Image (cartoon, rainbow, N blue to C red):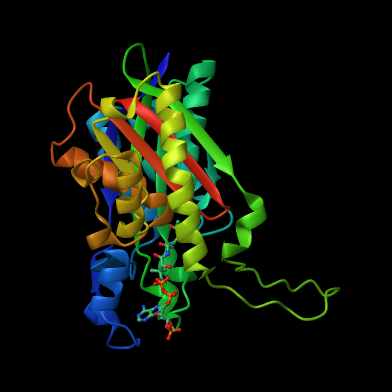
Amino acid sequence: MKTRICGTGSALPEKRVTNDDLSRFLETSDEWIKSRTGIGARHLAVEETLTGLTARAAESALQEAGVKPEELDLILSATLSADHILPSLSCELQRELGAVNAAAFDLNAACSGFLFALQTADAYIKSGQYQTILVTGGEILSRLMDWNDRSTCVLFGDGAGAVVVKADETYGILGSVQGTDGVKGDVLSCENRKNQNPYIAGTKDSAYVSMNGQEVYKFAVRTVPGAIHAAVEKAGLTIEDIDWFLLHQANIRIIEAVSKRLHVPMDQFPTNLQECGNISAGSVPILLHHVNERGMLHKGDKIVLAGFGAGLSWGASVLTW
Ligand code: ACO
């Protein structure tokens, strides 16, 4: 039995912020940001909640899949920036969508989160426990940024993506890999907790994302091509068989380096970071929806999805559309 993506959806906040907009209050420039990252703009949540954005993405995925909310067995949301710690985003989605028969839980694997969630859904479907699952990935990262730190806040954006997956005899996920290197976890971190335990002296206050950009870059360029090769091999395919490579949208230079190392032209690597920035767990499902709604995917296409980021962590899946 395979796990087939039957519907996709995405939602971005209304407020679009260009690099020039940022340069009005930060010492930065469109030229610096574009040349180092490829990012031209990002959407930032002002009125929106992550639950609201993800529900919009989910409704579109459900509609394309022809699945009613009450037919969902499970809702699995990848995020590191849910509206609340409790209840989880997945539980709030269950309520918003009226998915009364679905169990629901969140998963945090940072920028690899959507891949980890998709692979978890795949395991549930292969085990026979569930047949129809909503998998989402989304963030409101603007909540976790230090807006005085030009080295991080220019990189990220907000938004949500969703897919509905179903058990299928023929089409779907053919092979997956995932990995973690916790030893290097401190190159990309966010404490975001103020502990008021009266028995602990002093409180630690580093509630924002901090990153060693060059280490993250090296990690991504070294790890992602190997992960893609391993997933393609598990799928019983070769790199030449793959039609599309949909990578986490962290940085155009990382994507270009992966394309070079795999000897695959950049036109097989669709991107949307120019308009979206890095949306962590939201990147891959939003890109998948953008590519799908443009009619670029054809039945039988072989697609690689790959995520990588904090943890450090990485995941790649190969599927037949
Ligand atoms: N505007 C202008 N100048 C800036 C900015 C900015 N927004 N940010 C940093 N600078 C300055 C620095 O202060 C530094 O100045 P200095 O030389 O006077 O000290 C100079 O630019 C160079 O800084 P570096 O950090 O060395 O810049 P680098 O060329 O490495 O580019 C970047 C930084 C884009 C983050 C790069 O390291 C990179 O691409 N890393 C990959 C990591 C990544 O994409 N992370 C995304 C999140 S993680 C993930 O999703 C996997």
| 315 in relation to 183, above or below | above
Marks counted in the figure total: 0
Residue occupying the point 48% across, 40% down: 315
| 230 in relation to 313, above or below | above
Residue occupying the point 40% across, 27% down: 232
> Can you tell me which quadrant of the image ligand 1 is in?
bottom left
- Could you say where residue 266 lies in the image, as x and y percent from the top left? 22, 46
Residue occupying the point 28% across, 58% down: 273
| 1 in relation to 5, above or below | above
- Could you say where residue 29 lies in the image, as x and y percent from the top left? 27, 81
Query: In what quadrant of the picture does the C terminus appear?
Result: top left
Query: In what quadrant of the picture does the N terminus appear?
Result: top left
- Could you say where residue 261 lies in the image, as x and y percent from the top left? 35, 44
Residue 8 picture quarter: top left
Residue at the extreme right? 199
- Could you say where residue 292 lies in the image, as x and y percent from the top left? 20, 38
Q: Is residue 250 visible?
A: yes
Q: Nearer the viewer, residue 89 or 287?
A: 287
Q: Nearer the viewer, residue 130 or 213?
A: 213
Q: Can residue 321 be seen in this view?
A: no
| 305 in relation to 189, above or below | above
Residue at the extreme left? 295
**Residue 245 left/right relative to 90:** left
Residue 52 picture quarter: bottom left
